[in-house]
Amino acid sequence: MKTIFHLDMDAFFVSVEELLDPSLKGKPVIVGGQGHERGVVSAASYEARKFGIHSAMPLRTASQLCPHAIFLDGHMHLYREYSDKVEAVLRDFSPLVDMASIDEAYLDMTGSERLFGPPLAAAHKLHQAISRSTGLDCSIGISRSRLVSKIASDQAKRNGILWVLPGTEANWLAPLLVKRIPGVGKVTEKQLAAIGIKRIGDLARLDERFLLDRFGKWGLALAGKARGQDAGGWFDQEIGSGQGPKSISHEHTFPEDSADPQLLESTLIHLCEKVMKRLRSHALLARTAQLKLRFDGFETITRARSLPEHTDIDRDIITAILALFRENWPPPRKVRLLGVHVSHFSTTIPQPNLLTTAEDGKWRSALRAADRLKDKFGDSALHLGGALPGRYKDRVHEAAPKPNKPPSS
DNA sequence: TCTGGGGTCCTAGGACCC
DNA sequence: TCTGGGGTCCTAGGACCC
């Protein structure tokens, strides 16, 4: 039988900000941007939550609900540092750790009793170790499954520990609302409500056939989850079997919608460079490039293209992304957001062939040198040769007045 | 209220192949 | 001609999570 811990940092971003500036403690603090900006709340202090503010809420809404709240842009690199500290502590307790996000993790603590004692004692030690190392509060859920531990850590908030004893899972889950189940969001919640299912217990009583017919594969997983099992998809994977990323992306929402081709294309190039730098830092190559376009009015499209070979060279992705953009942007339609996304990774550089040029090797070493400089002096420190926005200028002007070309078939 | 950014997984249709 | 049955790859979109 397994013993799974789920550890979740309490109000993580806000708590790190409070370490930096203790005068923030006890005040309504919102991390994510300024109250008048486009954007949403990343994290809200418990004080701010009393005003009905929660993450994912538009900043402008938050500032109306609580005009005297303190709005902070946040320090992402610092949160990452603290996240690394948390991970280091976790690895002292178990070799099987999955960082599920920047502020939460699963630990497989099976068989750790000789080292740390029974689950509650071990959790207490872990809690103290996190506090000592970071000065931050966290909550810990314990059970036989990832799913129940995750829900338990949520119920344990804040700064608490909760152990759901083996065999009591279904009973413990039964009175909770279905939206406590990770994966059940607004849409599924509404669909379930429409057939009279409000609580996890209601869900557990349903016939599996019925759920399969009604919700497909997801319905079957739901039936298992209602009973506390790690059924289906991500939850089924062994802790510690974590692999590299499956996709890497960057996107940017403009402060104001724009139809300026030069601004749009240079933004795309910059996004491509950031994506490819991260790709190389993982020693990966990608084969599919995807453009994301969000227009005024929030209508959003994605357009993808797979390349003949895997690549880690900026030029290849920039070429594909700009082509997709020119085929799919109907000027003068205003653009709200641009995104660049790469996927279908490989770890090996393709053999030289008809498609690769002698240039590729030079590009590759030049890009690696550039990456090191960017690490040292910042992202905007330099742009390399062909990736320089200026070089694309002529074609920007060329492309600008043209009407939208349909995708070539 | 006017909606970020970085991810994962799933579905579904069409192309293409045997 | 009134229409197979898989299997896989590609693309687009959407739900969901933090």
Image: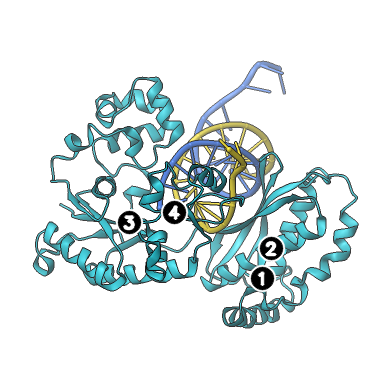
Chain colours: A cyan, B yellow, C blue
Contact (CB < 8 A) between labels 3 and 2? no
Are labels 4 and 3 on one chain?
Answer: yes
Please give the name of the residue rendered at 27% of the width and 67% of the height, measured from the top-left corner. A90
Q: Is residue A299 shown left or right of residue A77?
A: right
Q: Earlier in the sequence, mark 4 or mark 3?
A: 3
SS for dot 4:
strand
Q: Which residue is mark 1?
A: A313
Dot 2 crowding, Cα within 10 Å, few <14, some 14–19, many 20+? many
Chain letter for mark 2, please.
A
Q: CA distance from mark 1 to mark 2?
A: 7 Å
Are labels 3 and 1 on one chain?
Answer: yes
Contact (CB < 8 A) between labels 1 and 4? no
Above or below A222: residue A44: below
Q: Which mark is residue A10?
A: 3
Q: CA distance from mark 1 to mark 4?
A: 36 Å
Q: CA distance from mark 4 to mark 3?
A: 10 Å
